[in-house]
Each structure stands twice: as C-alpha cells, then as structure tokens.
Amino acid sequence: MLPHRNIEKTTWKAREPANARAVEAGALSTTENRQNRGRNRCSFPSSSGKYNVIEGQTSLSELTTEILAAQDKLALGGGEKAIARQHSKGRLTARERISRLVDPETSTLELGAWAGWEMYKEYGGAPGAGAVCVIGIISGRRHLIIANDATVKAGAFFPATTKKVLRAQRIAMENHLPIIYLVDSAGVFLPLQEDVFPDEDDFGRIFRNNAIMSAVGIHQIAAIMGNCVAGGGYLPVLCDKILMTEGSGLYLAGPALVKSAIGQQVTHEELGGAEMHAQLSGTIDFREEDDEACLAKIRRLVANIAPDSDQPMKPYHRVDSIAPARPATDLLDLVHPDPRKEYEIRDVLECIVDRDSFEEYKAEYGQSLVCGTARIGGFPVGIVANQHHQVRPANGPLQFGGVIYTDSAEKAARFVMSCNQEWLPILFLHDVNGFMVGRDSEQMGIIKAGAKLVNAVSNSRVAKITLLLGGSFGAGNYAQCGKAYDPRFVFAWPTARCAVMGGEQATSTLLDVTIRSLERQGEQVDAEQLAKLRDKIRGDYEAQMDVRYAAARGWVDGIIDPIKTRDVLTTALAVSTNYVEERPFQLGVFQT
C-alpha cells in the first residue's frame, strides 16, 4: 500500500486560514468561491450546440461513457455516405487501411482524435481534422502512422490538420519513431489557405520535417493511395520509399489547372498516374494494384528492419511488470467530475503503478504535491502529482489541495533534478488550481520557488509525460510541464479542464471589464442585463475550459478512458524511452 503520512482531511467548508485570502489566478480565493468553484466547469454541448452543465452527481463512469461515444462518432469521419463513396472507388478508408497495416491483436494509441472538434462549422466541419494519427506495431516494430481521411473534404488540409500532422511528426522526431504516411489528400483547403500555407508552423513545415527526419535516419515510407496534388506532392517524394496504387494521382497541377495555365490537354494518367511515375518519371519505387496489395507490400518492407527490443535505450531500463495494488475500475469511484469533491492522490496511484513500487519523496514536507519514484508496466519513473484534499503541515495553517505552495514547489524542483540525475522519465499528474498568493506567500518567496520548478522542468533531459486528471490552471499548468514545456505526450481524463484561471474568477473579471467598457460608452446596465451578461460570459468561458475544446486545438494529444490510464502510460513510456539524446543536465540561473 502507498503510505498516507501526516494527512488531515477536511471539508471545503473548513475555516479559511489567515494567509489564504487569495490564490493565484485559477486557485481558490474565498470561502464562497471554494464552495462554488467548478459548479459549471464540467460542461458539454447539447444537440443544439449550447453547453449544458453536468451537475455534481454525475459520475466519472457516465462522463467517460459520453466522451467515448462521441469519439466513436468522430471516427466515422465524413459519415456513412462519404465512406460508401470511398468504397465505390475501390479504396479503403483511413481507419480500414491502418487496421490492415498493424500487426493483428496488437493495441494502437491514437493521437489527436478530437482535432478540429466543433471548428470550421461554416464549411461543414472537419471531424478529426481530416486525418488519423496512430502509434501501432507493424512487423514487430512500433511506427507512427499518419493517414489522410478522404471522407472529410477529400482529405484537404485545414489549419487543425496541419497542426495535428506537425505534432505527430514532432513525436516521431523526439522519440525516433519511423513514420508511414498513407496519402489521400486534395491538398490545402483553399478557403483557409492563409492559415495553412506560409508560416513556420504551417503546411510547408511538414516537408521540412520530412527532410530533417531523413537526414537523422528516421525511416519514412509514403504510400499514395488516392490524390496527392500541388505542394502536397513533395511529402512522399521526400520520404525514403514511395508506393503508389493504380488510379492514384501525383502531380503539382491537375488536368484542369494545366489546361487553364498553359492550354495543354492532358489525361490524368499522362500527368501523374502510377504507370507514368513507375515507367517514365521514375518518381515512385513500387506500383501496386490496389490498397490491399500496397499495405501488404509496406508490411514486407518494414519486416526488413529489426523489430523493437524488449528493453529501452540505455540509460533507461525496464523490469518485469507487476499488476497494481488496486484494479483500474476503482478510479471511477475515487475521482468525481465535481472538482469540489476531495480524493487521495495516493489511492489513484495505487490503481496505476506497479504494486509496492512507490517510494515517496519528502512525504511530510510540501504535502500539496506528492512526489516519488515508482514503476509503471515495469518502467521506473518519477511522479509529481497534486494532492486533492487539504493537508496540515508540521508548522503553519492548513494548506489547500490543488494549490502549489512555496514548500511544495521547492520539493518538486529538487525532485525533478533528482530524476534527471538518475535518468528517470517523469510523469506529471495535474489537478492544480495554481500557486498560492497573498502577503505571506509573497514574503516566503512563492515566485522564486515557482521559478525553480519551472527552471528544472524546462531544462530536464529526461522524457516527460503529462496527464490532466482535473484542473490545469494558470502557472500551475506551466510548472507541471504543460504543453509549452515539451512533454513527449499530453493526455487528459474527461474531467480535465484547462484555462488561465477558474470559471468563477474569470467570469467576475470579464464581467467587470465588460461593464466598465459599456459605461464608458454611456450605456447603463440594469440587473436583468447584468444577469444575462454574466450567464453569457460564464457560458463562453466554461466552453473554453471543456477538455474537448483543448483537444480540438491540440493542447492535449488525447482524451483517455481513466480505466486505460496504465496501458496508455505504459505505451507512452515505451515510445519515450525508445531514444535518448545523451547530454549533461544543466540549469540556468537558479535563485536560492
């Protein structure tokens, strides 16, 4: 069992300590806010598109079921009719191609399933951003597969598509994962070309990454299984091997554009068919009859490369996996969607880590952050996790769960440095409202302590993985390795919420700003208008805190079933320890 040391649980209605008048944006600020915070934070859209509040009695199980059902619907891409059109061309869908490519009876890890969710409605939407990205095993070797979904706007690239593909490429580069591209795309979605085409994080960066990965020895295979036109044609040609199916097209400009530009009448096959590229231009390496033959050829090509080792690259290592002390299903009872309800983070860890492997670091100090080493699926890791109930330090008033104090920040910074010395990957578990503020905290050096933690996390040389269990607000997100701090993966439970501050605090702040602006324009706001304005502001802000809003924009790589947490983390650790760039652990200016 995990140790439960020096812990005093209290209710949210406990008397507020004198030095806890306020906390950093996103944390608790008053007794009233403590009782109200999160009342509307778990919000999901109804069929009308508006956001409905999930009340406190909703269970994690129900919430997860709702999320997974919606994700299954997203997996249909453009829908049943679009799938039928794809089949009528003699082609498989993106997901069908992937299922035939990966080894039978092996698991996959999908990334960015919610990309583009509720975005681009004026263009009919773009489920999954028109692409499917999966980590799967092919011929015994783990690969990252990027497949265009031609059922969504002919696989055209929206801004979210570009961001999703670039994120997948970054994961491949950081972890030296070979990539397979299943190309079936009409190119840039022209109505949004200004947000797709020119910048350093736009469409062209994909081809730059192709060249960089090839130069460092990351194997890339591209299969053209439909359209591959305009600038998108460079992607397969920059890969190590190119396959192409009959009926597919690879050209910079299609027949209609060629006729318009230079007056030349030319057929699809003459311009960019598989036979032409195999016999005349010499651009492709393998010409295949259809999707099935092409996917089988890819599997044979991959089989020429050595399969993955059971052991990660040194200095990482792995031992035999041991089942956790508690079943994963206990997580559904331990954590509630209502953020006001307390839970013990050590109980959560017992459902995730290998039995009896957790060794807590400084258990009696800085208790609002729980740090320690453990094993997950046999992989040794360091863990930094927020406690989610009040704790009593040896000296001073009670401390709120989910708030980072000076002592907990300094403890976590020291622990992160220790993990770097020992080459332990670090897992960050978020349920954080922010840093403690107020006179006493400032005088104790809360900014300085927080800066130490940010410094240590920023300069870490070991792999970092982040999981959002609940809130991930303000500077707490930064200090615990949010997306901006280069985690190899960022996952989230359905209960996760991410914003610069909590909903109640943000609503009050935005309401005050709006009212002052209206008054400067000579408008008077009566009580009824004020109530409507408050509801609108709160609704808009709550929508932005929804975990699906974050996933749609690539802030998290996936919303996962809590029961699958251990499996997902084990896969992420296997990927993250696949490659090591050995360099010294160095810190910048470190105030003491």
Image (spheres, grey):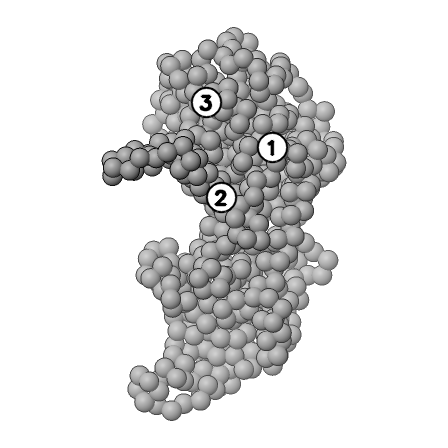
**To which residue does mark 1 refer?**
338
Q: Residue type at mark 2: give it.
A: Ala
Task: Tell me the SS state at disc 1.
Answer: loop
For the C terminus, the quadrant is top left
**To which residue does mark 2 refer?**
543
Q: Residues within 10 Å of mark 3 (few under 14, many from 20)?
A: many
**To which residue does mark 3 refer?**
29
Q: Quadrant of residue 210?
A: bottom left
Which is more N-terminal, label 2 or label 3?
3
Residue found at the very far bottom of the displayed protein: 265
Say if residue 128 shows up in the picture.
yes
Q: Residue type at mark 3: give it.
A: Ser
Which residue lies at the image location 50% right of the left edge and 61% below the top edge? Answer: 126
Q: Residues within 10 Å of mark 1 (few under 14, many from 20)?
A: many
- Horizontal side of 262 relative to 304 (left or right) equals left
Q: Is residue 218 above or below residue 425?
A: below
Query: As rendered, which of 328 and 539 lies closer to the eye?
Result: 539
Q: Residue type at mark 1: give it.
A: Asp
Q: Quadrant of residue 512?
A: top left
Measured as percent of width and height from the top left, residue 370 is found at: 57, 25
Q: Say how many tags the image has.
A: 3
Which residue lies at the image location 46% right of the left edge and 67% below the top edge? Answer: 156
Which residue lies at the image location 58% right of the left edge and 20% below the top edge? Answer: 12
Which is more N-terminal, label 2 or label 1?
1
Measured as percent of width and height from the top left, residue 125 is found at: 49, 61
